[in-house]
Amino acid sequence: MCGITGYIGKNNNAIKVVMDGLESLEYRGYDSSGIAYTNNNKLNVIKEKGKIINLKNNIDFNIKSNLAIGHTRWATHGEPNKVNSHPHQVNKFTIVHNGIIENYIELKEELLKNNYTFKSSTDTEIAVAYIDFIYKKEKDILKTLNYITKVFRGSYALGIICNDDLNNLYAVRKTSPLIIAKGTNENYIASDVPAILKYTNKYMLLDDYEIAKISSDNIEIYNQKLELVTKDTLEFEGTYESSMKNGYEHFMLKEIHEEPNVFKDTINTYLDKDFKNIPGFSKYNNIHIVACGSAYHTGLVGKYLIEKYANIPVYVEVASEYRYKHNFYDEKTLVILVSQSGETADTLACLKKVKEDGIDTLGIVNVVGSSVARESKYVMYTKAGCEIAVATTKAYLAQLTVFSVITMYLTNNKTLIEEISTIPTLIDNLINKDYKPIAKEIYKNKDIFFIGRGIDYSIAMEGSLKLKEISYINSVAYQAGELKHGTISLIEKNTPVIAISTDDTLSEKTISNIKEVKARGAKVIFVTNQNINDNFYDIKIDIPRVNELLQPILTIVPLQLLAYEVAKLNKCDIDKPRNLAKSVTVE
Ligand code: AGP
């Protein structure tokens, strides 16, 4: 996902602030970067392929500039190269863009007829050319940007500089996130809060189709009728340091170590002696859970717990499938959308479709004020704080915690409050075990299997995703009982099989499945809360036994750390795995 930063201010700190911001957004994943900055009333554009250091090497940080925009690009249209990098400039306009202009081809045809030519293969260059084209008619920047909000289709967050007005930085958005942040004699724009935390924690959220006109000491925001609107100023609860590594080698490791407090903060938001901050569920007799990736995996755990304990039917689907299927919902359905970033395009598209059909929605979201949070009828925030590593860990654990709380709420179960108080220490104990010896046993393998039954299968899916997304080892999670129906043909001597068993009612069958793979030479890593000493496994990872509503929160911790240690041995870019983005804002 692309990253945008922008600065305007009397302190002439534009280049440093914009570049600091881009570095704070590296976690989003990118393949090139660029900056446009004013100097002596001239606009300079520098852009480079590859890591931000390539851009920094071409910048003179002694230049005092009062206006700049910056961009990290995650290529969608056009390969990663200098020409396709942002900012893109056409005549008086220079822009940076996050999102996809879906009708760029028809816009290009109109522009070609008006003698525009193009250097890059991007939709963004067409967008800035179209802004220039309309400006020549409107001769007013606000009217021009308002016009394009009625023409551009798709998603966009735009940072805009116009040579006719270098006293203002402009911004406009639809679907792609953009914040306007407030400093002292300077103001900022950014795709996400970490980009400005070094300078301020006060920010506003731009809504779809709104235009921001930002000077060094004033921020004006206009709606689609070009009326001035007022916005609440939000204060981010974390600090710049809390969004940085604080001495850990990787953000992922830091964020796993934060899990005891994340559990505490999340559970305390919804439960002390009684339940609080939980929307009413009583009018619903069926639930749909829609999400992507790891968030989808927490939905599977939620399904298992809610169906087993609250006896409410739950249907779970990945968002990219759900939005195109004929779904059976009505006024008694609650659709729950789970999303750490709250900006995942597929999940957001489902939310909009379901709302159009008049169905109630609950967002389980980590980023305060994100699109899913703002567009859902109800929202339950996970209190994971800023999660920088692309591979989610603490936010995933917080989502599990919310589903545990929902199940306790639906069954009015207040009997776990004492056991809940032990969970942070139990998580910490699991974090402080050494998983390196186990990682050394498997990090050279090309295929690693995860198996489990029932709720353990859902955890196996997340353990497998964590491993493959950061260590690049092919991994798959299988229902333990299903392996023998074909896939067991792949098991050969020393094939690692990570078998999860925490459900006593299924343990015997799972152990039979483990013996099946063991008999074919597998190297079995047994992850369990059961005291079983036998030779059907090679390595055992013990998990404390707690109530089933809380068990998944413990089971996932060793799997996250095992994935981390394997990725480290494979010398992978753990926080920014290849090809991945922290939030996938394209469909
Ligand atoms: C998490 O490790 C993955 N990188 C990814 O699957 C992620 O969970 C998915 O893209 C959903 O993101 P969201 O929670 O921000 O919607």
Image (spheres, grey):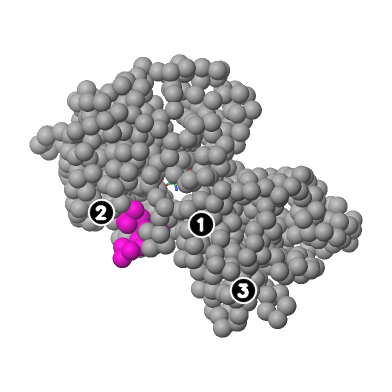
- Mark 1 and 2 residues: CB-CB less than 8 Å, in contact? no
Q: Amino acid at mark 1?
A: Lys
Chain part drawn in magenta:
243-255
Which element type, helix, strand or loop, lies under badge 3?
Answer: loop
Q: Amino acid at mark 2?
A: Ala
- In the rendering, at what x and y percent does residue 140 appear? 82, 59
Residue 138's place in the image compared with 466, above or below, is: below
Residue 246 falls inside the magenta stretch: yes
Q: Quadrant of residue 396?
A: top left
Q: Residues within 10 Å of mark 1 (few under 14, many from 20)?
A: some
- In the rendering, at what x and y percent does residue 379 appear? 47, 35
Q: Quadrant of residue 565?
A: bottom left
Q: Disc 1 or 2, which lies upstream in sequence?
A: 1
- In the rendering, at what x and y percent does residue 99 appear? 63, 51
Within 8 Å of ligand 1, the CB of disc 3? no
Question: Of 113 and 425, which appears nearest the observer?
Answer: 425
- In the rendering, at what x and y percent does residue 279 appear? 44, 28
Horizontal placement of 104 versus 278: left or right?
A: right
Residue 194 has which mark? none
The residue singled out by tag 1 in the image is 202
Q: Amino acid at mark 3?
A: Lys
Q: CA distance from mark 2 to mark 3?
A: 53 Å
The residue singled out by tag 2 in the image is 439
Residue 501 falls inside the magenta stretch: no
Quadrant of the frame with the C terminus = top right
The residue singled out by tag 3 in the image is 10
Question: Of 397 and 293, which appears nearest the observer?
Answer: 397
Horizontal placement of 17 versus 511: left or right?
A: right
Q: Residues within 10 Å of mark 3 (few under 14, many from 20)?
A: some
Q: CA distance from mark 3 to mark 1?
A: 18 Å
Which element type, helix, strand or loop, lies under badge 1?
Answer: strand
Residue 534's place in the image compared with 20, above or below, is: above
